[in-house]
Image (tube, helix red, strand yellow):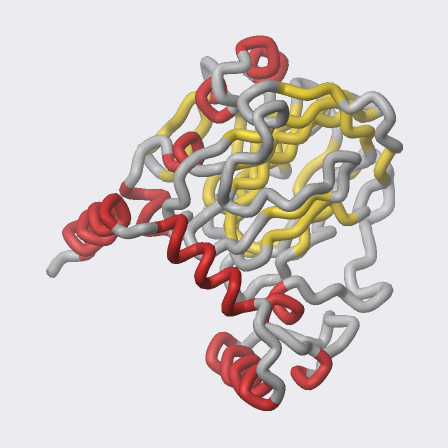
């Protein structure tokens, strides 16, 4: 079977799989504490995927009572020193760049030859989409073996949150290349920030087998693959009492792997020209600077 046919088959299979049920099951399993069995599984995972634990606050597998505790492990102090200069924008997460660049006509790239609408990503919020329509973006895919916490790319104050219920398709390379509008189909949380040099947004995209999305904001409920109360769903909520978060501060976490999209208004982010899809990023690494 050719690679293209295999990709199409994988995407087609996801339309019939009970994705929400599978994701809930994986979330439940990763939170179980099974003592030595859990530790053996974590050790096997570390070896199979060559996970670098030298950055972890707790580098020993024995320190984690569940797979979820391992997935959401913290970094040790000083593991990711930030570059000098407050105008420097840093990678919000460890992972691989799926796409990056300038928005054109309110659209952005999902993968080579595949684009999607900013308006659809923001679930029809035209005013919000207009603010970012001529800006820049960087999409980072977090694999299951990556560090799973997401951090602030630059300083800012959270001013709005929009939760969008949706599907739970995989966000791996095969689905990103094979399913148009993937990030607009999946469950996601959009948080908009006011920064000293412009506004930016972080979009946490849910995915198959992601137990939940957690945000470090005044609305810090976990987004656990199900619609929240009606007052939270499908509208943009102003966050009036949130504090300014410094560059590098923890913003949220995935309880497995997924995708985070950084969007910046014109003038806030001039991406470094060397950045390209496929590049591996480490949280805190420079990706650009204010224009």
Asked if residue 183 is positioned above or below residue 54 in the image, the reply reads above
- Residue drawn at (44%, 21%) of the image: 120
- Residue drawn at (54%, 14%) of the image: 125
Evaluate whether residue 281 shows in this view: yes
Location of residue 241 in the rendering, given as x and y in whole percent from the top left corner: 87, 26
Quarter of the view holding residue 231? top right
* Of 103 and 194, the residue lying toward us: 194
Numbered label tally: 0
Report the side of 162 relative to 217 (left or right).
left
Location of residue 181 in the rendering, given as x and y in whole percent from the top left corner: 36, 31
- Residue drawn at (56%, 37%) of the image: 261
Location of residue 19 in the rendering, given as x and y in whole percent from the top left corner: 36, 50
Quarter of the view holding residue 87? top right
Quadrant location of the C terminus in the rendered image = top right
Asked if residue 9 is positioned above or below residue 60 in the image, the reply reads above
- Residue drawn at (43%, 37%) of the image: 186
* Of 271 and 263, the residue lying toward us: 263
Asked if residue 261 is positioned above or below residue 115 in the image, the reply reads below
* Of 116 and 254, the residue lying toward us: 254
Location of residue 162 in the rendering, given as x and y in whole percent from the top left corner: 61, 26
Evaluate whether residue 286 shows in this view: no
- Residue sitting farthest toward the left: 1
Quadrant location of the N terminus in the rendered image = bottom left
């Amino acid at each position: 079977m050719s690679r293209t046919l295999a990709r199409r088959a994988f995407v087609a299979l996801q339309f019939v799989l009970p994705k929400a049920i599978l994701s809930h099951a994986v979330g439940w399993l990763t939170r179980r504490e099974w003592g030595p069995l859990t530790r053996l599984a974590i050790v096997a995972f570390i070896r199979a995927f060559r996970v670098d634990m030298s950055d972890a606050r707790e580098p020993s597998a024995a320190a984690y009572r569940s797979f979820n505790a391992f997935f959401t492990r913290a970094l040790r102090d000083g593991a990711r020193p930030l570059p000098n200069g407050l105008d420097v924008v840093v990678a919000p997460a460890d992972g691989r760049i799926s796409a990056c660049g300038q928005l054109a006509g309110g659209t952005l790239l999902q993968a080579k030859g595949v684009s999607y609408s900013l308006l659809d990503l923001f679930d029809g919020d035209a005013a919000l989409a207009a603010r970012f329509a001529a800006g820049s973006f960087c999409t980072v895919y977090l694999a299951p073996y990556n560090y799973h916490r997401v951090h602030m790319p630059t300083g800012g104050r959270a001013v709005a949150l929009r939760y969008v219920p949706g599907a739970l398709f995989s966000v791996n390379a095969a689905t990103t290349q094979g399913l148009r509008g993937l990030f607009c189909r999946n469950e996601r949380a959009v948080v908009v920030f006011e920064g000293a040099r412009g506004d930016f947004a972080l979009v946490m995209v849910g995915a198959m087998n992601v137990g939940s999305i957690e945000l470090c904001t005044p609305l810090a409920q976990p987004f656990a693959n199900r619609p929240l109360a009606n007052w939270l769903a499908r509208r943009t909520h102003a966050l009036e009492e949130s504090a300014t978060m410094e560059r590098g501060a923890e913003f949220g976490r995935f309880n497995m792997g997924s995708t985070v999209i950084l969007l910046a208004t014109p003038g806030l982010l001039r991406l470094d020209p060397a950045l390209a899809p496929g590049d591996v990023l480490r949280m805190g690494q420079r990706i650009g600077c204010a224009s």
